[in-house]
Amino acid sequence: MGDCQKCGKSTNDPQPYCDNCQPKQDIKQPADFAKSSEWLEASNFYEEYQEVQKSYKKRNWKKIFASLVTLLLFLGFGVTGWFYLTKITSANHTVQEFERAVKNEEADRLAQLVTFNHADSDFNKSQAADMIQYFNEHTDRFASTIAYLRASAEGADEEKDQLLHVTNVGDRLVLFNHYKLTLEPEHLNIETSQENVSLYIDGDKVGEMTEGVYEVQGVTPGEHVVKGEVEVNGEQYDQMMSVNTYESREEPVALEFDELSPEAAEADLRETLDDDIKQAVEQHIQEYIKAYETKDVTAFTVMKNDSYIEDTEQSIEEMEDSGKSFFGEIKNITYDDGSIEFRHHEENELFTSSIIVSFLLDTGYYLNGDDAEDVLSSESTYSWEYELSYDQEDRRWVISSGTPMAMFETDELDVKEYD
């Protein structure tokens, strides 16, 4: 129930006016509406609405088409990229790149394709250049290597005698394999006839050698500088040579030290033989006098004959027992140059020589406690044929034996006088 807003009469329905006060509304006929601007506006609105809907439909189809094309392109690029990455990360592709790098002499690229698993060295551009040069000079070896690598890339069993192997070294770009060519390490056999040789490979010391063959493991294939150093009697000798493992895989590399060879040593000894053995004899005579004067056979350094030293020691003991001392001076030494002989004993690499010598000594004995200057001395001449041998370690001539002589054998004499 409610009240009419105009007359206040009660109404049955919740409406603002009663039936009598309800405002009258003019009902427009369709013809009137068609003549009005409302119809025109409604008609224009409908047409615009239809155009907008058509535009929306066109836009939607364009978006759908563009999205579809984008998706297809994305899938196409994805599939193409997948096949491409699968190809360039395959074992076969690595072998093809290796073949191309060798044929085009691309050392940088080859160094990237080859890995050398060794703690002390790796495969660098210089060694790659050595490999390229070797394969270019040995086309048969290159062909057999390529054939093996292709078969290996297809899953063939690994052959241990081959230089290179196809190896999966890990993942690449997460989803793809990463293949390289693994290079087998080489070894070098170094040979020498010397003792205590310090061996260097490419400037790095790798060990000490004794007489015989020394094996160096883990060497990269290619060219290396091998150097040996040896010290003999305080003097340093060395030999350096270049070695290419492609050319000498099994043959020993010889460090000969030519200056220390028997032939070189013989030539050096012959060149100064006369002066050297005369100096040895003179020193022995001086040591002979010193041994008697000091009553000590340790004065002998040149004489190496044990019997001679024992006899001298016995004579000194007899002299001491009689309470005597010895005095001696050298007056002259005469060398028979015509008697000098030189011999090379190849079976034991021993050098010997001999010379006949005569020397005049002024000697005498005096009682202990007397003044040596007051001794009554006399001159005596002694002639000996000395046998000498060359001491390789001390690099000098020493006397191995002596035989008394009655006279010189030749007239080629060299006399040295002493004041």
Image (cartoon, helix red, strand yellow):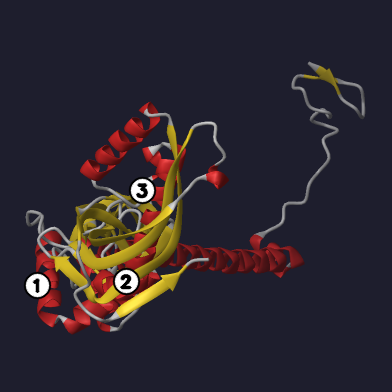
For residue 153, above or below residue 10 = below
Rendered-image quadrant of the N terminus: top right
Q: Residue at x 13, y 67 (%)?
A: 150
Are the residues flagged by discs 1 and 3 in contact, CB closer than 8 Å? Answer: no
Disc 1 is placed on an element classified as: helix
Instruction: Using the image, determine if residue 275 lies above or below residue 231.
Output: below
Pick the front one: 145 or 35: 145
Q: Is residue 97 in view?
A: no
Separation of marks 2 and 3 at Cα, in angstroms:
65 Å
Which disc is residue 119 wearing?
A: 3
Relative vertical location of residue 348 with respect to residue 94 in this rendering, above or below: above
Nearer-N-terminus badge (1/2) = 1
Q: Look at 21% across and 61% down and name the residue there.
A: 91
For label 1, the residue is 144
Q: In the rendered view, would you say 323 is above or below 345?
A: above
Q: Which residue is mark 2?
A: 335
* Spot occupied by residue 308 in the image (x, y as percentages of width and height): 25, 45
